[in-house]
């Protein structure tokens, strides 16, 4: 079963990002932020058994720093080829790109180390390929360009969380933390 260590925004920011995702993805969406797909920055995704998952969860819970500021630098649109782990049928990804800073890199490498130490299998882009981002959604076709004034830039404060990985790289099990 796949899981993830992620950073979550507060409810207000989640709702703002979900509204932006809906404006961009509209009816062409395959997956959008919303009630079952909370906004998150993935630190590491992994597959493991119950013992491995418990070890990673324990590491995360013991980490003294549970929040982290991150900097949004812009909005990215990218084609996703069919056969992708997260979007098997392919589509167009859109999301907010995050500056890869030393403190975020350190968190990623600590989480990756805990996954490897537990004997679990990392999934997706890890190590030198780690690309911090907040996925807003994936569409079947060309998404709409939003009013760029609605695209947040600058610093966000995010909180460490742990959950089961759902469809299209979402974390439905964490949705209750962001409910209205």
Image (cartoon, rainbow, N blue to C red):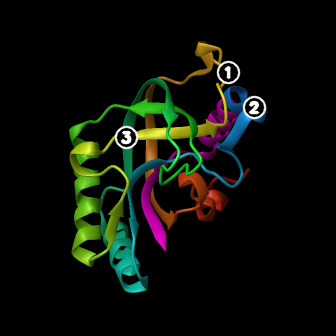
Q: Is residue 113 left or right of residue 10?
A: left
x, y percent for residue 60: 35, 66
Label ID, residue 172: none
x, y percent for residue 88: 55, 51
x, y percent for residue 74: 45, 23
What secondary structure is marked by label 1? loop
How crowded is the residue under tag 2: few (<14 C-alpha within 10 Å), some, or many (20+)? some
Pair 3/1: label in front: 1
What secondary structure is marked by label 2? helix
User: Which picture quadrant has residue 30?
Assistant: top right
Q: CA distance from mark 3 to mark 1?
A: 23 Å
Q: Is residue 16 magenta?
A: yes
Of the image marks 1 and 2, the number of the one nearer the N terminus: 2
Q: Is residue 174 left or right of residue 15?
A: left
Location of residue 93 with respect to 42 vertically, above or below: above
Residue displayed at 67% across by 36% down: 140
Residue that protrudes farthest toward the bottom in the picture: 51
Q: Nearer the viewer, residue 158 or 80?
A: 80
Residue displayed at 23% across by 55% down: 109
For the image, the number of numbered tags is 3
Pair 3/2: label in front: 2
Q: Please report the bounds of the magenta region as a residue range.
A: 1-22
What secondary structure is marked by label 3? loop
Location of residue 96 with respect to 53 vertically, above or below: above
How crowded is the residue under tag 3: few (<14 C-alpha within 10 Å), some, or many (20+)? many
Label ID, residue 132: 3
Label ID, residue 144: 1
Label ID, residue 26: 2
Q: Nearer the viewer, residue 109 or 138?
A: 138
Check whether the beta carbons of the residues at disc 1 and disc 2 lie within 8 A of each other.
yes
Residue displayed at 73% across by 34% down: 28
């Amino acid at each position: 079963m796949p899981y993830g260590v992620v950073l979550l925004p507060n409810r207000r920011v989640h709702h703002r990002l979900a509204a932006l995702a809906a404006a961009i993805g509209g009816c062409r969406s395959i997956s959008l932020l919303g009630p079952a797909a909370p906004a998150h920055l993935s630190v590491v995704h992994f597959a493991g058994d119950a013992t491995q998952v418990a070890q990673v969860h324990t590491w995360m819970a013991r980490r003294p720093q549970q929040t982290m500021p991150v900097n949004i630098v812009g909005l990215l649109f990218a084609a996703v080829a069919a056969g992708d782990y997260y979007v098997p049928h392919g589509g167009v990804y859109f999301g907010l790109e995050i500056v890869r800073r030393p403190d975020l890199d350190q968190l990623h490498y600590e989480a990756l180390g805990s996954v490897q130490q537990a004997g679990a299998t990392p999934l997706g882009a890890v190590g030198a390929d780690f690309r911090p981002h907040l996925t807003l959604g994936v569409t079947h076709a060309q998404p709409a360009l939003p009013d760029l004034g609605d695209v947040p830039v600058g610093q966000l404060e995010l909180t460490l969380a742990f959950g089961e990985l759902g469809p299209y790289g979402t974390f439905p099990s964490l949705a209750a933390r962001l409910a209205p």
